[in-house]
Image (cartoon, rainbow, N blue to C red):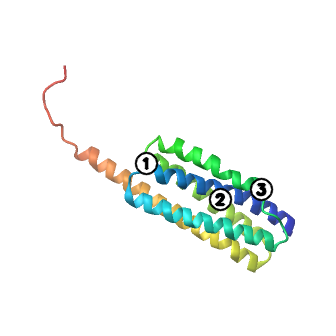
């Protein structure tokens, strides 16, 4: 891949990183679960770091960060609101899917970059996307296990027939 192609790919990823940032911003204000709120705060910090790192790499490669990339915040916020309406577990499943695809996208790009120093810079974002993915996966499993246990252990409060 030449630098022009790499910049083009990085600009696509930059748009997606802005989308992730908008997503976590909206979900932060919609969730009531303290540990999820803390995770979203850290995720927002990491997404902002990813954006800054990508901009720096693009500029280093004599490219220009795409102006449209900052518009990614808007669809991210809308997606965050929409997904939150489906419940905490489904919200986290959507976030998990997004981070998994992000990790895969970074991995595919890194494999195409012949400059190892540049690949190492991009791999920082890839690693953090993977860490977010793993945290989300663990949290989903915990919520589903808790829900399953609550349903199994549920005892009716009354034995009287309805009606």
> How many residues crowd mark 2 within 10 Å: few (<14), some (14–19), many (20+)?
many
Q: Would residue 7 appear left or right of 120 to someone viewing this image? A: right
**Image quadrant in which the N terminus is located:** bottom right
User: How many numbered callouts?
Assistant: 3
Q: Position of residue 31 (x, y in %)?
A: 43, 50
Rendering quarter of residue 124 = bottom right
Residue at mark 1: 88
User: Comparing marks 3 and 2, which lies closer to the viewer?
Assistant: 3
Rendering quarter of residue 112 = bottom right
Task: Please tell me which residue is depicted at 27% across the width and 47% down the height of the picture.
Answer: 150
Task: Please tell me which residue is depicted at 58% across the width and 58% down the height of the picture.
Answer: 99
Q: In the depicted view, which residue is nearer to us: 111 or 162?
A: 162
Q: Are circles 3 and 2 on residues that touch, CB within 8 Å? A: no
Mark toward the start of the polypeptide (3 vs 2): 2
User: Comparing marks 1 and 3, which lies closer to the viewer?
Assistant: 3
Secondary element type, mark 3: helix
Residue at mark 2: 17
Relative to 106, residue 117 above or below: below
Task: Please tell me which residue is depicted at 55% across the width and 62% down the height of the picture.
Answer: 44
> How many residues crowd mark 1 within 10 Å: few (<14), some (14–19), many (20+)?
some
Residue at mark 3: 67
How far separated are the C-alphas under marks 1 and 3? 33 Å
**Image quadrant in which the C terminus is located:** top left
Task: Please tell me which residue is depicted at 54% across the width and 55% down the height of the picture.
Answer: 24
Mark toward the start of the polypeptide (2 vs 1): 2
Q: Would residue 138 appear left or right of 161 to someone viewing this image? A: right
> How many residues crowd mark 3 within 10 Å: few (<14), some (14–19), many (20+)?
few
């Amino acid at each position: 891949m030449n630098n022009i192609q790499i910049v083009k790919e990085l600009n696509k990823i930059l748009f997606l990183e802005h989308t992730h940032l908008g997503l976590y911003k909206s979900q932060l204000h919609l969730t009531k679960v303290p540990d999820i709120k803390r995770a979203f705060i850290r995720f927002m910090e990491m997404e902002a770091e990813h954006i800054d790192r990508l901009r720096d790499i693009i500029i280093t490669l004599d490219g220009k960060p795409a102006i449209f990339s900052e518009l990614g915040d808007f669809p991210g916020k809308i997606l965050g609101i929409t997904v939150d309406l489906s419940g905490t577990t489904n919200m986290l499943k959507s976030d998990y899917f997004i981070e998994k695809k992000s990790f895969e996208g970074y991995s595919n790009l890194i494999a195409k970059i012949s400059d190892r120093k540049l690949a190492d810079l991009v791999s920082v974002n890839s690693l953090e996307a993977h860490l977010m993915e793993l945290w989300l996966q663990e949290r989903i499993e915990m919520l589903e296990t808790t829900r399953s246990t609550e349903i199994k252990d549920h005892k009716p409060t009354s034995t009287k027939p309805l009606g």
